[in-house]
Each structure stands twice: as structure tokens, then as C-alpha cells.
Amino acid sequence: MWVCGAVFRLRALAGPRKGLCPASGCRGPAAASYSASADPPRVRALVYGHHGDPAKVVELKNMELAAVGGSDVHVKMLAAPINPSDIKILVGGNYGLLPELPAVGGNEGVGQVIAVGSNVTGVKPGDWVIPANPGLGTWRTEAVFSEEALIEVPSDIPLQSAATLGVNPCTAYRMLMDFEQLQPGDSVIQNASNSGVGQAVIQIAAALGLKTINVVRDRPDIQKLTDRLKNLGAEHVVTEEGLRKPEMKNIFKAIPQPRLALNCVGGKSSTELLRQLAPGGTMVTYGGMAKQPIIASVSLIIFKDLKLRGFWLSQWKKDHSLDQFRELLLTLCDFIHRGQLTAPACSEVPLQDYQRALEASMKPFVSSKQILTM
């Protein structure tokens, strides 16, 4: 079960967590929240009733908006991205949290408050809000959420930055801060460097005075990608193949060997990251794109005393207070205000074209995050 009003289950909306009901109407107590003289407003949502191919299991449905209770907030969604974790949840893959079905897709996004209940004190109409926890179901035009499920964010940051603020930049910042005591001039190495997290790592590291070595898969437009990452602040960009070449030693003539490696791939790529770490360094794994295990040689573990750690933002949130998460978001917004952190490369897609967005998000070598606009 997911917490903090995070998942609004379509078959259990009669309780205090009001979300959406099928357009054919709700049965039982939920119907009592609607006026008998007027039909409740209808909204659109991307719903899936079982796991499988996202392009096949996701449907755009008309839903009815629940009444606003005393502790509820009526939100008009503005934009919501499609993240790799969303795809994993849709296919029912190896992910730490899977919602009860049927469910509305989307774990991240930004909306604007339209109305609030009489007991709501934390937000007001006009405010921008994002999910406090995963599973909110952001792929919809509007919804009624409990106040505790939302966190206000500044409305003076770019829309794409707000829509993608709550997952990737938070992951990047925490991994840079929590595992090694890095100082300006130190270096960090990472794979999947063109991912949303990777782009955030590059920018936040540059703002902190850290050097980044960024590993990407080779591709026909590799120079274009290299230039784009360097424009974000990347010190070095190398391919997976280049990482295995002796020339890598030349990089460390100008910068120190990294004490922190960030792994989102697994398999051979993670093994090569370990080989580049300085003695006593740490590799943090936050994803497994290659769907292959991490192989760490005995000699690296013994003679270099390397540490293998994992990071999952959802667990970090469980271990920390809502105020600490809010403080993290404000720190990232400061980077945005100073022009040191931008949204990842994005393609905005209208909600009704969701199939095109889902298909694009699963193609290889796509560096543009798909964002559904409402």
C-alpha cells in the first residue's frame, strides 16, 4: 500500500481520499458527495487496469471529479513527464512500489490549485503544487487530492523545471551530497549521463565546483550529444567503449580520480566505473538500464576497498520528514533561479497524443524527456 494519499484507487474512492470516479458513476457512499441536480465535472485521465505494453494497457478515459472535502485540494494539472520508473510500473517490472489496479499513471508533474477545502492551510488557489510522494497519478487534466499529498513550489520557475523537479534533480543532489564528502575540484564519474538524473548531476556538480566524467552509449550523433552535455557543464564526455581504453588515464592527469561513481546501467558499464574509482571510493547504484547484475572483482573490493551502495528517492523520503523534502526542493529552486539548473531536454506532447509520447519514451538513444501537457 502506498502512503500519504499517493495513489487514488479508482475502486476505493468513497473514503476520505477523493480522486476520480469512472464517468459511468460511482457506487455506494461516494455518490453522496455529488449534487443530485447537476452532473459533476468530467476530466480526462490515462488509466491502466493491468500491466503490460504501455502503448496497449494505457487508455485515455473520461472521469468524474470528486467533491472537494474539508482537507482536499482541487488541482488542475499543467504538465507531467513520463519517467523510466513510470514505464517500469506500467509493465509491472521489478520496481519497489506497484499500485493497486486500476490506477492513473504518472508519478511526477506540476499542477495549479483551483480551490481548497475549509481546513486547508498550506496552499491557496493559484499556487503551484507537485506530488509529495510517488503514485499520485499525475497523467490527468485535474483531480481532487488530499492536502498532505501535495507540496507547494514557486510559480516563478519554468513550467518544465517544475514538472520535473520532484524526482531526477532530487536524486542527483542527494547522491552528490550523501555518500562522499566531496570538495570543489573533486571529480565524479557517472554512466547514463544524458538521462534526466545525469543532466541534473552535471549541472549541480558544476554549481558545486565538482568535475564530472560522463559516460554515454555511442551513437550516430555522438558529437551533438557531447556538445550538449558540455554546454551543461560536463568536464569530460566518453563513450562506454572509450571508458575501457588506456587513454582514460590521460583524463586523470588534469583532474583527480573520482571518489564517487553514479551507476544507472549495471552490467559491464558498472564494472568499468568501479575500475576508475580512487581507492576507498563509493559507487552508488540508482538504476539498472542494462538489466544485468553488477559484477565487482574481488581484487577491486579488497585492494581498493571500494564501497557499493544503493539509492532510492522513495526510501529517502520515508527516512526524512516532509520539511526536509521541502528544504531539498527549495535548494534546487535556488539553483534554478540562479540559472545553474535547467530542465532536461524535453518534448511537450498533448495528453491526447499520449501513445506517441509513450512510444517515444521507450525508444533507444532518445535524450528528450516526454512531457504530457494538459
Image (spheres, rainbow, N blue to C red):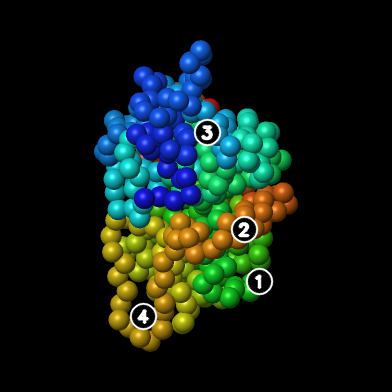
Residue 144 bears which disc, if any?
Answer: 3
Say which of marks 2 and 1 sits in front. Answer: 2
| Mark 2 or mark 3, earlier in chain | 3
The amino acid on which the numbered mark 1 sits, given as a three-letter code, is Pro
Residue at horizontal 66%, vertical 66%?
A: 209
Question: Which residue position is annotated with label 2?
Answer: 323
Query: Separation of disc 4 and disc 1 at Cα?
Result: 26 Å
The residue tagged with tag 3: helix, strand or loop?
strand
Residue 169 bears which disc, if any?
Answer: none
Question: Which residue position is annotated with label 1?
Answer: 184
Residue at horizontal 58%, vertical 37%?
A: 70
Task: Give 47 or 20, whichever is nearer the viewer.
Answer: 20
| Mark 4 or mark 2, earlier in chain | 4
| Mark 3 touches mark 1? (CB < 8 Å) | no
Q: x and y percent of residue 312 in the render?
A: 44, 60
| Mark 4 touches mark 2? (CB < 8 Å) | no
Q: How would you rate the neighbour count of disc 3 (Cα within 10 Å): few for under 14, some for 14-19, many for 20 or more?
A: many
Q: How would you rate the neighbour count of disc 4 (Cα within 10 Å): few for under 14, some for 14-19, many for 20 or more?
A: some
Residue at horizontal 63%, vertical 31%?
A: 115
Question: Which residue position is annotated with label 4?
Answer: 300
Q: x and y percent of residue 342 in the render?
A: 62, 47
Position of residue 202 relative to residue 159, above or below, is below
The amino acid on which the numbered mark 4 sits, given as a three-letter code, is Leu
